[in-house]
């Protein structure tokens, strides 16, 4: 079953076009890391985010692939240089969860 890594961010200025472009570049870099099957990300468009205004979702084949991703140099550098500078000065500017899919493959009939 696939493994999902979901990260919610509180950006300092979610309306900053340059910040969103930087996050897009970050996502493009992260999707090149071995073991990453997919990357989806974008700004929150509802008021339900409780202050989290940007989200990213990565898919991996295994928990081991996700663990390797966390320590991969490209991930570490991208977080440090591109993502952290954009975050709000908040007690918890990032919320991450990781889970295995219980439902199985998505099929459309």
Image (cartoon, helix red, strand yellow):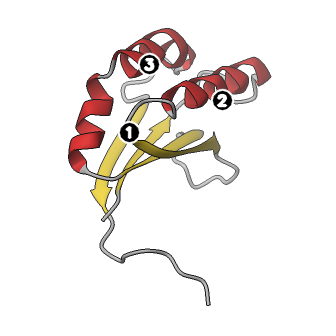
Q: CA distance from mark 1 to mark 2?
A: 19 Å
Location of mark 1 (residue)? 95
Q: CA distance from mark 1 to mark 3?
A: 14 Å
Q: Quadrant of the C terminus?
A: bottom right
Which residue is located at x 47 percent, y 17 percent?
A: 78
Q: Position of residue 95 (x, y in %)?
A: 38, 39
Location of mark 2 (residue)? 24
Location of mark 3 (residue)? 79
Task: Of the two numbered discs 1 and 3 on the same chain, state the one appearing first in sequence.
Answer: 3
Q: Position of residue 55 (x, y in %)?
A: 54, 42
37 vs 102: above or below = above
14 vs 80: above or below = below
Which residue is located at x 52 percent, y 20 percent?
A: 87
Q: Nearer the viewer, residue 29 or 79?
A: 29
Q: Secondary structure at mark 1?
A: strand
> In the visual, does 18 lie left or right of 9?
right
């Amino acid at each position: 079953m696939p493994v999902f890594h979901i990260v919610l961010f509180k950006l300092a200025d979610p309306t900053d076009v340059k910040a969103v472009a930087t996050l897009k570049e970050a996502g493009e870099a992260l999707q090149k890391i071995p073991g990453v099957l997919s990357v989806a990300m974008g700004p929150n468009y509802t008021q339900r985010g409780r202050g989290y205004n940007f989200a990213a979702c990565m898919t991996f084949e295994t928990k081991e692939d996700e663990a390797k991703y966390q320590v991969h140099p490209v991930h570490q550098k991208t977080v440090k240089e591109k993502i952290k500078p954009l975050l709000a000065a908040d007690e918890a500017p990032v919320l991450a969860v990781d889970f295995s899919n219980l439902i199985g493959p998505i099929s459309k009939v």
